[in-house]
Image (spheres, helix red, strand yellow):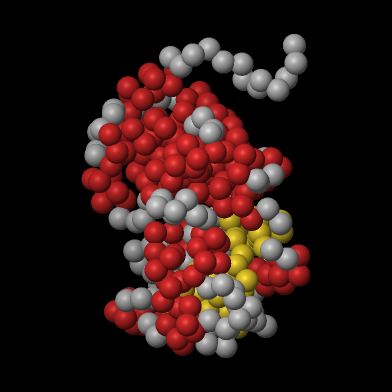
Amino acid sequence: MASIGILGAGSWGTALAILLCNNGHQVSLWSHREEEAKRLDQTREHTSKLPGVKIPEQVRITADRRDALQNKDVLVLAVPSAQIRRTCREIGPDIRFGQIIVDVAKGVEEETLTTMTGIIEQEIPGADPVVLSGPSHAEEVGRGLPTTCVIGARSEKTAKYLQAIFMSPVFRAYISPDMLGIEIGGALKNVIALAAGMADGLGYGDNTKAALITRGIAEISRLGVKMGGYMETFGGLTGIGDLIVTCASVHSRNRRAGVLIGQGYTPEAAMKEVKMVVEGVYSARAALGLAKKYGVELPIIEQVNKILFEGKSPAEAVNTLMLRDQKIENPLMPW
């Protein structure tokens, strides 16, 4: 049995608390809002994020951050990507050397173009950062529906240790050394999902969705490989797998925000309507920054940025994509 502290009592943090508790581990779930911690402790249900899903009594729910940090074998960082650096900076003085910290947020910091585990390494130099990612909506993990993810770590020892902790009859965990590829896939798929949602909001069909998913993974893998990730990662669970579920699922907040934008909502109004953090909006500019830094063409992501931040209409953006110069699908193939 491992002692695990989960920082962040949103839908994903709560779902993982339920999973890990059911796996037989000692789990503490921390919320930065005292009123939320008290409500969750009393009702044992996150009614706004995971309605109908009960939190086991064995899960300790607290608003005392040190209580969630002390004497833990594993820490899970489940705060939104935009809050990762601040959270790491705040908890850094209380973290022991070698502490395993599992990041489950998906994003790239806009200002620095740093991945989430990169931020952990910068702010808590003695930590052992890990990433957990894959096609895994909290709504389904919390209900115990079969789910598969990938754990990326610096060492095989750490990866196998966490694999044993997370594995269950309803949660299968693979391991990988390609932390960078996993994180780039997880961050950029949210931007493509915004585009897929916009297409749905415009009333386009399955052909359009298939094109966005296929060309989207081409963009993600093109950038990821240029940055040093492995092509095999983008063909796996944290690449095409995560992209498919985020572009198609009713649970996807990024797709939902995209649908609203396609229907005429402003990006700000769409995010307000979704009532959850839309990570793709925060990752879009970072993705464009990475494209410029590494000299990679990302036409879909470029158009999403124009819609989000320059007022371009989704219909006009689709027209721009359709009328691009004629291309060969894969320039590496010989005639």
Is 185 on the left or on the right of 283, as rendered? right
Q: Quadrant of the C terminus?
A: top right
Q: In which image quadrant can residue 49 be found? A: bottom left
Q: Nearer the viewer, residue 9 or 106?
A: 106
- The total number of labels drawn is 0
Above-or-below relation of 226 to 54: above
> Can you give x and y, in whole percent of width and height, for residue 170 in the image?
65, 62
Identify the residue at horizontal 38%, vertical 34% (top origin): 304
Above-or-below relation of 49 to 31: above
Above-or-below relation of 59 to 106: below
Is 255 on the left or on the right of 33, as rendered? right
Q: Nearer the viewer, residue 142 or 310?
A: 310
> Can you give x and y, in whole percent of width and height, for residue 299 in the image?
46, 28
Q: In which image quadrant can residue 231 be found? A: top right
Q: Nearer the viewer, residue 100 or 38?
A: 100
Q: Is residue 45 visible?
A: yes
> Can you give x and y, in whole percent of width and height, for residue 183 in the image?
57, 52
Q: Is residue 104 visible?
A: no
Identify the residue at horizontal 56%, vertical 72% (top origin): 125
> Can you give x and y, in whole percent of width and height, for residue 253 in the image?
40, 49
Identify the residue at horizontal 59%, vertical 76% (top origin): 126
Above-or-below relation of 255 to 296: below
Q: Quadrant of the N terminus?
A: bottom right
